[in-house]
Image (tube, rainbow, N blue to C red):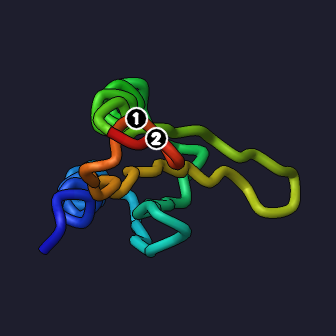
C-alpha cells in the first residue's frame, strides 16, 4: 500500500475515533479525506480534529447553510524521481 494511502487511512481512522464519519478517496495525484462535522462537536474534539488534519499536506473546512460543515484533508502522493534532475533538454 502506498505511503499516501496509509497516511490517509490513518487520518480517517483518527477522525472516526473522534466520532466523525469519514470518506477516503483518490484524486489527481493525492488521497482525500472528507468528514461531516456536526454542530455539537465539543471544543476538546475540535482540538483533536485539528491535530489530526495537521498531519495532511492540506486541509480545510467547507461550511454552507445548505449542507452543513465538511472537513477535508489531502495527502499528496509521492512523485516518482528520475535521473533527469536538471530538466528537459539538458545534455551531459
Characterize the local packing of mark 2: few (<14), some (14-19) or many (20 or more) Cα atoms within 10 angstroms.
few
**Badge 2 is on which residue?**
90
Q: Nearer the viewer, residue 3 or 45?
A: 3
- Picture residue at 59% right of the left edge, 38% below the top: 60
Q: State the quadrant of the C terminus.
A: top left
> How far, Cα to Cα, is label 2 from label 1?
6 Å
Q: Nearer the viewer, residue 91 or 36?
A: 91
SS type, badge 2 = loop
- 48 in relation to 83, above or below: above
Which circle marks residue 86 in the picture?
A: 1
Across and down, in percent, residue 67 comes to 78, 62
Q: Which is in the foreground here, disc 2 or disc 1?
A: 2
Residue 70 in view here: yes
SS at mark 1? loop
Classify 10 Å Cα crowding around label 1: few (below 14), some (14-19), many (20 and above): few
Cβ–Cβ below 8 Å for labels 2 and 1? yes
Q: Eyeballing the image, is 53 above or below 7?
A: above
Residue 61, numbered label? none
Q: Quadrant of the N terminus?
A: bottom left
Res 43 quadrant in image: top left
Residue drawn at point x = 55 percent, y = 52 percent: 38
Amino acid at each position: 500500500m502506498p505511503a499516501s494511502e496509509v497516511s490517509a487511512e490513518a487520518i480517517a481512522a483518527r477522525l472516526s475515533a473522534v466520532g466523525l464519519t469519514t470518506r477516503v478517496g483518490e484524486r489527481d495525484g493525492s488521497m482525500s479525506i472528507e468528514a461531516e462535522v456536526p454542530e455539537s462537536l465539543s471544543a476538546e474534539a475540535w482540538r483533536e480534529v485539528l491535530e489530526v488534519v495537521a498531519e495532511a499536506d492540506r486541509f480545510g473546512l467547507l461550511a454552507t447553510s445548505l449542507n452543513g460543515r465538511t472537513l477535508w484533508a489531502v495527502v499528496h502522493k509521492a512523485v516518482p524521481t528520475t535521473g533527469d534532475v536538471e530538466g528537459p533538454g539538458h545534455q551531459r
